[in-house]
Image (cartoon, coloured by chain):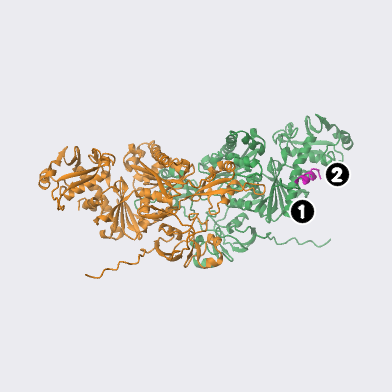
Chain colours: A green, B orange
Amino acid sequence: MGRRLDRRVPRRAAVTAGRVRLTYRLGDGREREVSAPPGVTVFDAASWNGIAVDSTCGGHGTCRKCGVRVSDPAPPTLADARAYDPDRLAAGWRLSCRAVARHDLAIEVPPLLTRPKAATVGVGRQVILRPAVQKRALVLDEPTLADQRPDLERVLDAIDDLEPRAGLGLLRTLGRTLREADWQVTAVVVDDLLIAVEPGDTTGRRFGLAFDLGTTTVVATLLDLSAGVPLAAASRLNAQQPYGADVITRISATMLDHEALPRLRDLAHSTLSELAREVCAEGGVDAGEVYEIAVAGNATMIHLALGLDPEPLGVAPFTLAAARLPETRAADFGVPAHPSAPAMVFPALGAYVGGDIVAGLLAAGMDRDRRVRLFIDVGTNCEIVLGSAAGLAATAAPAGPAFEGAAIRCGMRAAEGAIETVRLGGGPGVAADPVVDEVVLGVIGDVEPRGLCGSGLVDAVAELVRTGLLDASGRLVTPGRAAEIAPKMAERFTEVGGERVFVLHGDIYLSQRDVRELQFAKAAIATGWSLLLEEMGTQGPAVEQVLLAGSFGSYLSPANAIRIGLVPRLPVPRVVSAGNVAGEGAKLALLNLRERAGADALLREVRYVELSDRPDFNDRFIANLAFP
Amino acid sequence: MGRRLDRRVPRRAAVTAGRVRLTYRLGDGREREVSAPPGVTVFDAASWNGIAVDSTCGGHGTCRKCGVRVSDPAPPTLADARAYDPDRLAAGWRLSCRAVARHDLAIEVPPLLTRPKAATVGVGRQVILRPAVQKRALVLDEPTLADQRPDLERVLDAIDDLEPRAGLGLLRTLGRTLREADWQVTAVVVDDLLIAVEPGDTTGRRFGLAFDLGTTTVVATLLDLSAGVPLAAASRLNAQQPYGADVITRISATMLDHEALPRLRDLAHSTLSELAREVCAEGGVDAGEVYEIAVAGNATMIHLALGLDPEPLGVAPFTLAAARLPETRAADFGVPAHPSAPAMVFPALGAYVGGDIVAGLLAAGMDRDRRVRLFIDVGTNCEIVLGSAAGLAATAAPAGPAFEGAAIRCGMRAAEGAIETVRLGGGPGVAADPVVDEVVLGVIGDVEPRGLCGSGLVDAVAELVRTGLLDASGRLVTPGRAAEIAPKMAERFTEVGGERVFVLHGDIYLSQRDVRELQFAKAAIATGWSLLLEEMGTQGPAVEQVLLAGSFGSYLSPANAIRIGLVPRLPVPRVVSAGNVAGEGAKLALLNLRERAGADALLREVRYVELSDRPDFNDRFIANLAFP
């Protein structure tokens, strides 16, 4: 009966050597403290932490609205000098989008002139609505002999807060559009590019497409960028499947057959374009109103979709063509959108920790959280990221095919008829019913089961471990032993083709081989995060939250993931499903232009740890095979 | 017998309100003073005036070799801070490519580390050889598990003085090239764009194509950018001729027929590509070794070649789609070159003073000369520019078709068989032979004459004026009067179709109508420059030099141009043929990257005067019809 601990400790941002502490004093008197890597602008650090600062140009230094007053400011830039008179400069006023933070700063943010919209995205992140796609309705003065400005310059002059560049394609239609529209037009600017000039006032119509380009499943979301909300979403299987279920197999296909790469690219394009058409139709949006797309995918998926040779990704030492791609357009991905619509592609950290992971980390706010968190993307590949605002490390674990249907005897992908949850009624520790007496199955679609998918596999194994019907080494007990422990289960223990199996339903069973596959997978993953924990100098209990992401991870039961040792032993509420964070990251990038800089900052901050050259990998792997 | 005037006045650069005076102290002790518009970098002002400053990145701020010591410097930029320690910064050291001149400065240029090559181009201009096209031979470290840098980043890291961006096209072949070439490659950078990575060491092979895209004639020059010399040149008729001999007719064609624009574009492409093939074959150069092209052409030619609708150019108030075009590639002009080769296109001043004139002004150094000069491009259109380093004004004169073959009775273009010079032996003022007794003709190709071209027309009229056989009002004398003045010429004075003519040779004659056509043309031109002289506040005698440029201007006899009043009355040596200055300007742009900034500076400095809305145009025109 001691005193209640005073838990009201000030919420100080964690600062490591190298990071800077920025203290924002807001217009309403509140103070917010933020930790950011040095070299980041005051505007970006605010943006990434949900602190609103006025802006219409999204950080390009041209609207001059993002001014703040900075303690100990750097010498003014040219843009500052154009925005402020010498007295204000001397008093510390700077454009926050130009003010680079290199040491701790106090920043006074003036009261907002416009109330920004916000959207909730990702894992509880509220992001200020500031898309790269902007529109400006213009009523232009017609040319006269006294004002012979060229068409393009006339349009650019009329957009006074932005200074975009233009492409040749725009010029081909500009003159006609201006004259037919009687000089009343809408300029469409994406980031710093003027991509279109449309007749009339079309400012209400701004749309973007976010893609999660997965190895197995591709998800598209149509976003209304004015409102900051999704209008429609759809998913399809990646049409590249015939060339292999995983990245290695598809890469091999391109090495064996020179025609395979263009075909794989075309298959990716067909999947992306069909999804685009589907969501646009559902949302009542014309392709020409989609002004930007964002694509989150692993390195192989991105390379194949762009027709880049993926072979170096599959062969040691596993290198990318580029981590950050040059400018790409929606057309390069085969996506029907405005002809000049750019494509924002999440940069990859390495050949095996790709843009999809970076997108997921962004959505989860991994680098902006004090808490040490473990992010595991359990899918066709398994990427693991550990850390916090103090630093991040990432690796990729060779999990093998356990989570795909093919390697499991009665396995199938997560579609209608797949057993996705398994519970054994009763058992040790269940006071009311210590004897295991039934098998309760959850089937996708609530139909007659056809097979077992990844989450069902984990459930089945976890339950068998819990009830002692699977020993710690991973062996199914003998039928005789089963009869002793759980008589009602005994008849399910049998053999098929000389192999011990546990019958789930009818001719759907879990085999001994299946259990081994899962052990390999979870051992690889566990070895991955335990090595990262050592790299980061933390012990298991310091992990405050585990995020399960990916096509399988999102559906795994946290309790069972803990039980089989897939994740560190933590209280169950601390293991959460992150949902489709890659897709959320893609949406984030469309809703707020500064999030891309956030992705780039992540890239610089995450340290990649290559597992395959660790001498102790094998020993740890073997040690991690057993169930805890 | 007075004292000889001391002519050794210091050669001070003319400075007007707004221009800044930069005094360079060179490594060898000499001092050079330069006048430049404010806002220009110290590096560019040096470059444009033949003052060599070390550089390998051509002004992008990445090589850090262009340092100078500046009196009264501005606060250091980020690039300065990376290049110099605080002591040096405090002492005034700055990167000259980042140092923007806003007021008079003294600049100390350290001794050169590398002796730059120079090329002589244009009208006596020596330009430092510093093409935009650069190559770097690289021997890269192969990737290993310890060094998994992506291919693109590996290449960029190895180019330590440049920080180019790359295009997606490069990535498609990069991986294969690197591996097949065993990591020994040559990076090709054009300005700030990495356009290619080639196997092995290809640094000796750098070529560019300079095009003068004329309405009538197109000229191509193949340049060896390593040596700074032309390898081959060729010219052809612009294949767009069937659609009209002048810009107005071709513009009308596009307005009457929607298919005309793409066809005109294709015709331009075919002319350009045939010329490219011709000069590359002659120079032994592969198309893929041409990494950049430069195109000088009037606004209509540029619009048509790029497939941009030219209609606004032909209709009041005569506006361009854009003065400065967005990035274009050689492929946009149909020119066979490296697939990613950019095209540098000279910006236009207005619809009727185009990139060809800007290129010509650059080559003539009009804005860098103390002397007041008059530049007249006499061609299918007539552009007139007057001024000096103190300021420039430009206009376009509606000269009519006098200089084309079609409007002249026996007219033809300047091809084999055309009478290009005409001299009347003897005449008033020729002491040895005061009586005109013969007609001496110069014919292109020295063959039997077939017709009369522009220069021949001017000669014929000028000689007839000189000998009194054409009166000041432009009327051919009667046969009777001719018999009195020049009996041996009398029989040449006759009539054809009721019109007075002067027979030159056989059935080739000069008609009264022809003389009128020429009068209209020269009256328009004379009105143009006399109005400019008023605009600029100078009188005729202040013009120190007249440059005759253009397809006709280059071939006009200066003495005869003076005689008919086409140019101001000046001593004959002060009227010079400028040659093909548009083509020279295009070559300049390829040989020195900073010349493009020079073209942009010109654009900002030249004031365009629209003649057609001048109320006194008609009166002056009429007054200028007579021969002086």
- Residue with the mark numbered 1: A539
Q: Residues within 10 Å of mark 2 (few under 14, many from 20)?
A: few
Q: Which mark is residue A500?
A: none
The span shown in magenta is A617-628
The quarter of the rendered structure image containing the C terminus of chain A is: top right
Q: Residues within 10 Å of mark 1 (few under 14, many from 20)?
A: few
Query: Three-letter amino acid code at disc 2?
Result: Gly
Query: Three-letter amino acid code at disc 1?
Result: Gln
First along the sequence among labels 2 and 1: 2
Question: Do the residues bearing badges 2 and 1 touch, measured as CB atoms within 8 Å?
Answer: no
A452 or A409, which lies in front? Answer: A409
Q: Is residue A79 above or below residue A495?
A: below
- Residue with the mark numbered 2: A429
> Residue A529, how many percent across, how many down?
73, 48
Q: Furthest-right residue in view?
A: A484
Check disc 1 and report its element: helix, strand or loop: loop
Eye-nearest disc, 2 or 1: 1
In the picture provided, is B544 more to the left or to the right than A427? left
Q: Specify the subunit that label 1 lies on.
A: A
In the picture provided, is B523 more to the left or to the right than A38? left
In the picture provided, is A47 more to the left or to the right than B474? right
Q: Residue at x 67, y 47 (%)?
A: B145
The quarter of the rendered structure image containing the N terminus of chain A is: bottom right
Marks 2/1 same chain:
yes
Q: Specify the subunit that label 2 lies on.
A: A
Q: Is residue B357 above or below residue A31?
A: above
